[in-house]
Amino acid sequence: MRQANLKLNLNVKKTRKQVFLSVIERVMPWVALIKLIAPYYSEGKSGRLLFPFQKMPPVQFIQQWFTLFDPSLNDAFLDNPMHQEFAQLEEFCRLPNENTILRFRHRLEMHKLAEKILGVVTEIWIQRELLLKTGATMGATLIAVPSPTKNKVNLRELEMHSRRKANRCIYA
């Protein structure tokens, strides 16, 4: 018996990452960024076929927003179709590899385009009254350490506070 391959998406609720990327997609000045980068990018008429530079700005933003190294960014494109969709890579047979990502970033650094890109994005977002803040989710962990009076001068460290965990005194 044959089974149908329907590619149904049964997820009704969007993740925070999906919501974030869909909002960003609507407010990013992609055309202005492409115009800014285009004069510094070669046509690639000789040598091997270059990856389309128009696809690289979203790749760079994904790398920055999700703090991914070049190899892990390449893996993220393979693991997470959401990243591919945001960078509009689904119609291409190949994804940018870590060398492509590295060379593009070096080109931006060489021509000091990162500051210019940030300026264009910031200017347009200010006009639209938008703000993007950075942040991180951190978990607190209590770690067992020696008593705070067991330091070199046998004095209590004022920053240390004691807690009880499983009938043990823990200093944090």
Image (cartoon, rainbow, N blue to C red):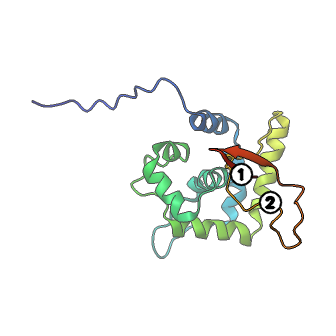
Residue at (90, 56) in percent of width and height: 158
Depth check, front residue: 80 or 86: 80
Quarter of the image with the N terminus is: top left
In the displayed orientation, state which residue is furthest to the left: 1
Q: From where the camera sits, is residue 96 visible?
A: yes
Count neighbours of disc 2 (C-alpha within 10 A) and say few if under 14, some if 14 to 19, many if 20 or more: few
Residue 115, disc = 2
Residue 133 locus on image (x, y percent)? 78, 43
Q: From where the camera sits, is residue 137 visible?
A: no
Decide if residue 139 is on the left or right side of residue 13.
right
Q: Quadrant of residue 145?
A: bottom right
In the displayed orientation, state which residue is furthest to the bottom: 47
Q: Which amino acid type corresponds to the residue marked 1 in the rendered image?
A: Ile
> Quick check: 114 above or below 135?
below
> Quick check: 117 above or below 149?
above
Residue at (70, 54) in percent of width and height: 35
**Which residue is labeled 1 in the image?**
170
Q: Which amino acid type corresponds to the residue marked 2 in the rendered image?
A: Glu
Of the image marks 2 and 1, the number of the one nearer the N terminus:
2
Decide if residue 68 is on the left or right side of residue 155.
left
Count neighbours of disc 1 (C-alpha within 10 A) and say few if under 14, some if 14 to 19, many if 20 or more: some
Q: Secondary structure at mark 1?
A: strand
